[in-house]
Image: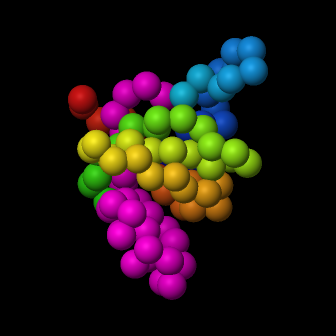
Amino acid sequence: MNLARLIAAAPRRGLHHRLPAGALRITDIDVAPAARLRVREMGLRVGQIIRISHRGAFGGLVLAIGSSRVAIDRATVRHISVEEAAA
């Protein structure tokens, strides 16, 4: 499932969107070749376990990767596919 679609499909409550609380495993990252190195430098790799920390401005997300936090923009979010992972 595409990470952006997962977020968009989440039920809305009040002013905030409900974000998946569990662990997610990255299954595919389909970014332009020029962006691949930068994505890997941020710790985003196929098989990596992530959690969505919170929603950033303009559709971006803050992801928890281990003890680190990484902010990614909406365009990048659309190119990351995830599945639910056992915690």
> Would you say residue 40 sits in the magenta stretch?
yes
Q: Which residue is situated farthest in the bottom direction here?
A: 34
Total residue callouts:
0
Residue lying at 57% horizontally and 61% vertically, measured from the top left: 76
Q: Is residue 9 visible?
A: yes
Left or right of residue 79: residue 37: left
Up the image or down, 87 lies above or below 72; here it is above
Quadrant where the image shows the C terminus? top left
- Image position of 35 (left or right of 13): left
Q: Is residue 21 above or below residue 30?
A: above
The part of the image, by quadrant, that contains residue 40 is bottom left
Q: Is residue 38 left or right of residue 66?
A: right
Q: Which residues lie in the magenta part?
A: 20-45
Q: Residue furthest top?
A: 14
Taking the spot 36% from the left edge, 54% from the top edge, the residue there is: 27
Q: Is residue 42 above or below residue 85?
A: below
Q: Position of residue 13 (x, y in %)?
A: 70, 15
